[in-house]
Amino acid sequence: MTDSASGQGSLPMWDQVAALRDFIHGRTYAAAVPTIRLNGEPPHAPDSALARVAEVNQALYQVTSHLCSRLYAELETGRPGPLAKASWQALVSIAEVWREDPELPDWVSELLPVKPQ
């Protein structure tokens, strides 16, 4: 981390951004597997559950990619500002849904807010 050892307010190192991005992208891909169509298969009905899953999945993938791109650009300046912090906090917030996932890196778990009882 670049600001302090841990905490949602601190900034990650480049490889930590990549690791969290890869984790989130892996989970979105796994969720999308049922929506993947083979060549020649017709598209899912527009209002079907599979079509919605595919849309949401693609949106999460794009949001994660966009946040990472912004964060990379900020980190590259050597003087990351509020945009970098907001992007990192958003990525950590996305990861919170996988709080119990055994493959979530331990250092990410440490950044998550304490789960309410």
Image (cartoon, rainbow, N blue to C red):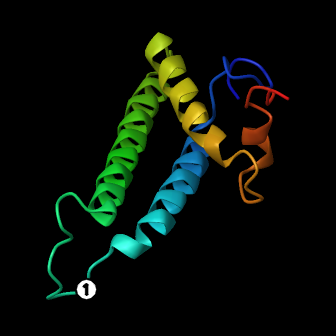
Residue 59 image offset from top left, x and y in percent: 33, 46
Residue 99 placed where, x, y %? 72, 44
In the current view of this chain or complex, which residue is farthest to the top?
82
Question: Is 85 above or below relative to 69?
Answer: above
Residue extending farthest to the right is 117
Secondary structure category for the residue under label 1: loop
Amino acid identity at mark 1: Leu
Q: Residue at x 77, y 40 (%)?
A: 109
User: Which is more toward the observer, 76 or 63?
Assistant: 63
Image quadrant for the N terminus? Answer: top right
Q: Is residue 4 above or below residue 66?
A: above
Q: x%, y% of residue 84? A: 49, 21
Residue 40 visible somewhere in the drawing:
yes
Residue occupying image coordinates x 40% and y 46%: 60
Residue at left 48%, top 56%?
25
Name the residue beneath numbered marker 1: 38
Residue 39: percent from left, percent from top:
18, 87
Which residue is more in the foreground, 8 or 28?
Answer: 28
Badge 1: residue crowd in 10 Å (few <14, some 14–19, many ≥20): few
Q: Is residue 78 visible?
A: no
Residue at image point 79% right, 31% down = 115
Tell me the quarter of the image containing the C terminus. top right
Give the quadrant of residue 65.
top left
- Marks counted in the figure total 1
In the picture provided, is 64 more to the left or to the right than 110?
Answer: left
Q: Is residue 114 left or right of residue 30?
A: right
